[in-house]
Amino acid sequence: MTTRRQKAGRTPASEATFFGYRFQRPKLLTWALTHRSLAYETKPETLPDPTSDNEQLEFVGDAVLGLAVAESLFHRFPSSREGELTRLRASLVSRRHLSAIAAEIGLGNLLLLGRGEEQSGGRRKPALLANALEAVIAALYLDGGLPAARAFIEKHIIEPALPELNLAMQASSTFSGAIGDHKSALQEHLQATGSGQPHYVLTAQSGPDHQKRFRVEVRIADGSGGTIPLAESEGTTKKQAQQEAARIAFQRLVAQKHTGMEKTP
């Protein structure tokens, strides 16, 4: 395996490098990337064998991920209470976060899928991607121990989320720790400060049907029948644009709060 995007499903065991790590036992990586659908379609007689697909590895990977994340948060936020660390850990190991990371690093292209799963868009399914990422973490752990798994987890799962983790700690009493769910974070913050509900307005869209761009503004009521704009952003989908606008608004409000400038409409 390499960090380069590869043709879907091309994961021969002879390729032993995965995101900078060289496997001593490459077959562990192949195992981690093999979905149950492949065994079901090609060798149904192997289905009772837990090593025919990556489901068993998901179990191990989940435990390794939880330990590595807990240890990292313990060292990064030494002044935090158990409840705060628990919220952050829950977000970092959530299906939502893991599937987003897996998609970002192109893990879907490396999976070994059955034809039916391939045709149904399995390489983009959030649950399948999250499970495969856990299986890969298990393969790293079984091959190189905790240091190998920890290095991957730190670089690809924890470090990209650090800006949000820091924001979450700054607004610890009003933020649930839903890393990547900026709309929920903004809503909780506004409710805690008595500012009401955020409203998302589509202000513009452009581009052909297959390359649409959407511009969304997030607003709150000003108490006199009007609204106050908090932030605006673009995305390839309305949902993406809303999340990005919410992220910008949340960061601004948290910064204002900690400089004593925040005002409730």
Image (cartoon, helix red, strand yellow):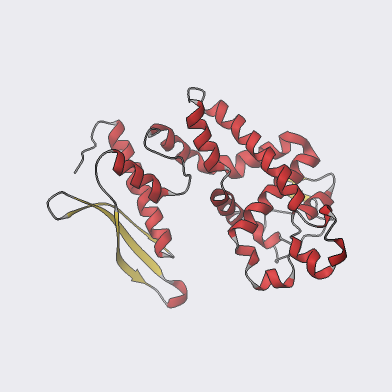
Q: Is residue 158 above or below residue 9?
A: above
| 177, 160: nearer the viewer | 177
Q: Is residue 143 above or below residue 221?
A: above
**Which image quarter holds the N terminus?**
bottom right
- How far from the left and from the top, in percent, is residue 34? 76, 58
Q: Is residue 142 visible?
A: yes
Residue at x 76% of width, y 46% of height:
139
Residue at x 67% of width, y 57% of height:
4
- How far from the left and from the top, in percent, is residue 5? 66, 60
Q: Residue furthest top?
A: 79
Q: Is residue 129 left or right of residue 233?
A: right
| 225, 159: nearer the viewer | 225
| Quarter assignment of residue 148 | top right
Residue at x 43% of width, y 40% of height:
176
Q: Is residue 184 left or right of residue 97?
A: left
- How far from the left and from the top, in percent, is residue 211? 45, 72
